[in-house]
Image (tube, helix red, strand yellow):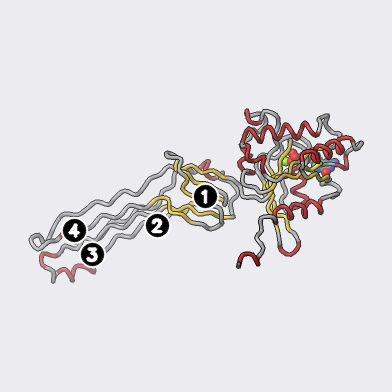
Amino acid sequence: MPGLSAEKCVPRGGPSGGDGGRGGHVYIESTLRHNTLIQFRYDRIFKAQRGRHGEGSNRHGKDGEDLVIQVPVGTLVYDDETYELIHDFILPDERVLVCHGGRGGRGNAHFATSVNRAPRHFEYGFPGEQLNLKLELKLLADVGLIGFPNVGKSTLISRISSARPKIGDYPFTTLQPNLGVVELENYRSFVVADIPGLIQGAHLGHGLGTQFLRHIERTKVLLHLIDLSETHGRDPVEDFETVNAELKEFNPLILSKPTLILGSKIDAMDNQGKLQKLRKFSQDKGLIFHPISSVTGLGIQELKHKIAGMLAVDVVPVESQNK
Ligand SMILES: Nc1nc2c(ncn2[C@@H]2O[C@H](COP(=O)(O)OP(=O)(O)O)[C@@H](O)[C@H]2O)c(=O)[nH]1
Ligand SMILES: [Mg+2]
């Protein structure tokens, strides 16, 4: 025992009880490696390591190891009791301390006085913080795709980006949001979010409901796809109004975002009637109308540039920043 020989020279052999170690802290960190909060469906309780006991010869107990919980970029962390926002993880690799580990107790060495040189007194360690958190993910995309199910949203994102979502000729093939990065010339790019389609009554829970709309709450531009093909008997203007009514129920501010109306599947139109009706309607509303076919590629290149132009409005020119 290394301490023993030293204590021979210390009156009454002490006191030399070291302090306990601190419990580990709990951090939350944002990462680009995850896209969903799915892991938290299974793992719900997270604990950092406890601190180790102090030891003789004034040896300080080891601090517990910190715990780092990773969440996708775009996650908002709330205190579940007070609903207070603790942090909004906008950037990758942000790290926030959410619970401090408890301080270790002081060993008997601390309690020695001139009258009591060999105290038996020591202090217990303190419990660490505990917190119930609520995590909410709102994806951070520049552009959001909206529209009825089956209008070609997932096909469009797979055409303009490297995202490969499931595509099918039936409603609700897309069950979770997909993100795609659209590359432009000169290393410019933007991110598009594809979410499940909306139907009438979505705000009442019909279809997949409006739960996914939170993912487009933070986008800068919306692409509203309207199917102009003959594969269904719906009216293009009614489709637009129906989807907008659902958006409004969810959050009316979404309607104030710059929106492009996309007439989709124009390769599968029998006549120009639907297209002309939608074009006229868009003009009357002062909205930009753009026809596309994700199958033939018609209008796709122009679409990318139109979106880039709409996003660039935010960019402050370099010269004016120095004034
Ligand atoms: N003819 C034609 N069919 C398309 C086009 N875009 C999508 N589709 C078809 O429409 C169906 C629904 O497409 P999908 O992208 O899954 O629609 P979403 O539900 O809006 O994501 C699929 O069978 C696609 O192949 C298009 O531009 N032209
Ligand atoms: Mg889809």
In the displayed structure image, the side of residue 129 where residue 312 appears, left or right:
right
Mark 2 and mark 3: Cα distance apart in space:
21 Å
Three-letter residue code for mark 2: Glu
Mark 1, ligand 2, within 8 Å: the answer is no
Mark nearest the camera among 1 and 3 is 1
Which quadrant contains ligand 2? top right
Residue shown at the point (41%, 56%) measured from the top left: 66
Three-letter residue code for mark 3: Asn
Mark 3, ligand 2, within 8 Å: the answer is no
Mark 2 and mark 4: Cα distance apart in space:
24 Å
Instruction: Return the x and y of residue 170 as percentages of the image width and height.
Output: 76, 35
**Helix, strand or loop under label 4:** helix
Mark nearest the camera among 4 and 1 is 1
Residue identified by numbered label 4: 108
Residue shown at the point (40%, 57%) measured from the top left: 65
Instruction: Return the x and y of residue 227 as percentages of the image width and height.
Output: 80, 37
Mark 2 and mark 1: Cα distance apart in space:
25 Å
Q: Of callouts 4 and 3, which one flags the residue occurring earlier in the amino acid sequence?
A: 3
In the displayed structure image, the side of residue 281 where residue 187 appears, left or right:
left
